[in-house]
Amino acid sequence: MGTLAILMGVCGGEAYLPGQLESILRQTMTDWDLWVSDDSVGEEARVLLAGLGDRLGRRLHYRQGLRRGVVSNFLGLACCPSISAEFYAFSDQDDIWDSDRLQKALDRLGRVPPSVPALYCSRTRLVDDEGRLIGVSPLFAKRPSFSNALVQSIAGGNTMVFNQAARALLVAAGDEVEVVIHDWWLYLLVTGAEGVVIYDEVPSLSYRQHEKNLIGGVRSFSGWLRRMFAAFGRSNFRDWVGRNLEALERKPALLTDRSRADLECFVASRRRWLPGRLVGFLKVGIYRQTVLGNIGLLVAAVLGKI
């Protein structure tokens, strides 16, 4: 099975932290250590964690974050040289994990040779700030791939568990990369290295939807329309994709030959007029996971918003 390091980023939202810690303590897989990077201004999180010192013991490792934002907070943990394990799990501060979440992920990851980068992720149940069920994240049926990762993050970082070979990609890329979000970046790196991505259709945790969420779930068609219109209308999507591409271009050695060729073609196609742009996108085979997502992708491609 092997040891596992839980990498938890904290910043505000301490009201929900005790519930998340309790769900971690209830895990059926017990060979883990909890590493917390606290980006908060106050002392609330540190005090809460200290209060659980007797139950967490030497498994708790606390450090003050650099207050450079969520990406820096998580990548700083993932790349920290003093953290060593066979497997790693990102953790938000306000979710509620299923008791078998870690065990289920390790059962799947354990079937992959250790030398192959491997990432487990899953759907989530969406709950309100009181923990009441309000929905489930979308079901993605298409295969995970680099062509998908170029234009979409398949799952939230709060569901991600990955092996040492995948962690090595994050370390090689460094913790100061200018990317949109850490989970999308990990999906890009693992698929770009032609590793294994395991997408579990069964939710592994309850994801709180509240006003302090950095990124919330989309629960309805109207919500999807609002998000897509906002992103494409302000060219946010093109900017997000561009930032990820620039980061990948600085680390070509982390990609396979095929992924590098797709990256070069995609980058070049984004600069072309409409016919050449569409031909290039078709050659790379970019796609999103749902029909509605691909309709939005086509519209964005025509309008030059990718």
Image: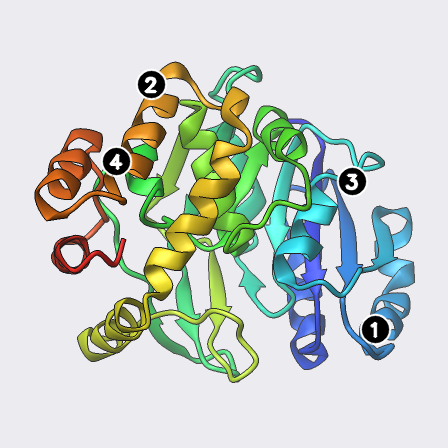
Which residue has dot 3 on it? 80
Which residue has dot 2 on it? 258
User: Marks 4 and 3: CB-CB under 8 Å?
Assistant: no
Tag 4: Cα neighbours inside 10 Å, few (<14), some, or many (≥20)?
few
- Distance, label 1 to label 2, CA atoms, is 48 Å
Q: Earlier in the sequence, mark 4 or mark 3?
A: 3
The residue type indicated by label 4 comes to Arg
Looking at the image, the residue that sits furthest to the left is 275
Numbered label attached to residue 48? 1
> Is 62 located above or below residue 226 in the figure?
above
The residue type indicated by label 1 comes to Leu
Q: In this view of the protein, which residue sits in the foreground, 205 or 227? A: 227
Tag 2: Cα neighbours inside 10 Å, few (<14), some, or many (≥20)?
few
Q: Secondary structure at mark 3?
A: loop
x, y (%) of residue 74?
66, 52
Q: In this view of the protein, which residue sits in the foreground, 208 or 284? A: 284
